[in-house]
Image (tube, grey):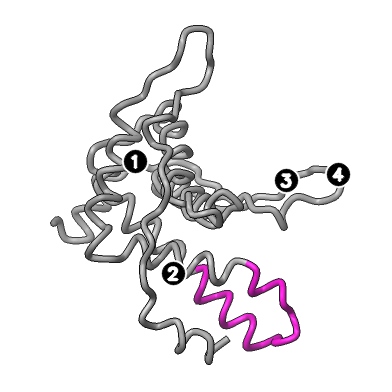
Amino acid sequence: MNCPFEVANLMTMAVVHHTIFDFQINSRFCIHITSHASWRVLDATTAMAYALITSYGKKNRSISAACAFLRGFHHAYPLTSDERQHLRLLTAGRLATSVTFGNYSYKQNPGNEYLLLHAKPAWDALSLLWNDDTGNAIDDAFRIACENIHISAGATIPDSEDIAFPDPCLIDPLSSARAKSS
C-alpha cells in the first residue's frame, strides 16, 4: 500500500460534484450541486455510496447498485487501476462521513426524523463494505464492473446481468448499541 501522499499523486484531478441527492432536487426539478477540484474518483465513490442506500440498495441489492453505477461511470470516464484499487475505501469513507454528520445533526435536532431516513441503510452498507468476510468479494465485484463492460447491439448503456446479485446477509453484533444511540 502506498503512503497517502503517494496515492494522492496517482489520482486524476477533475471538477467533482460530490453530491446529487434527492433533497437537492426542488419542485422545478432544478438540481443544486456543489463542486470543486478534487480527485475524479470521488464523484464515482460518492455516487456509489448513495447507490448503496437507494431503494434498490434497501432491497438487499446494494452492492449491485454500486456496481451498476460504477460500470456506467467507468465506461464514460475510465478509472485508472490506482483509482479502482481504492473504490471500497473511498466509498466507505463517504458513507462514514454521512452517518457521522447525520448522527450529529439528529442529536442537534432530535425531532427531525428525516435525518434518520438513510441511517440504517448506511450502517448496513458500511457493514458490508468494511467486513473481513465480504471485503475481497466486493473488491472483485467492483473489478468485474470495470473490466467486463459489454454493450448489446443497438443499446447505448452497458449490460449489467453479470453484476446483478443479492447482498450477503450479515449478523450485526452492534445492533443493540446502535438502537440505544438513535
Question: Which one is nearer the viewer's eye here, 68 or 98?
Answer: 68
* Kind of residue sitting beneath label 1: Thr
User: What's the magenta bit mostly, secondary-structure-wise?
Assistant: helix
Secondary structure beneath label 4: loop
Percent from the top left, x then y, of residue 18? Answer: 53, 52
**Which image quadrant is residue 84 in?**
top left
* Kind of residue sitting beneath label 2: Ala
Q: CA distance from mark 1 to mark 2?
A: 23 Å
Q: CA distance from mark 3 to mark 2?
A: 24 Å
Whether 114 is drawn above or below 87: the answer is: below
On the image, numbered disc 2 is attached to which residue? 96
**Nearer to us: label 3 or label 2:** 2
Magenta stretch in the rendered image: 98-117
Q: Which mark is residue 28?
A: 4
Label whose residue precedes the other's in the sequence (1 or 2): 1
- Circle 4 Cα neighbour tier, 10 Å, few/some/many (<14 / 14–19 / ≥20): few
Label whose residue precedes the other's in the sequence (3 or 2): 3
**Nearer to us: label 3 or label 1:** 3
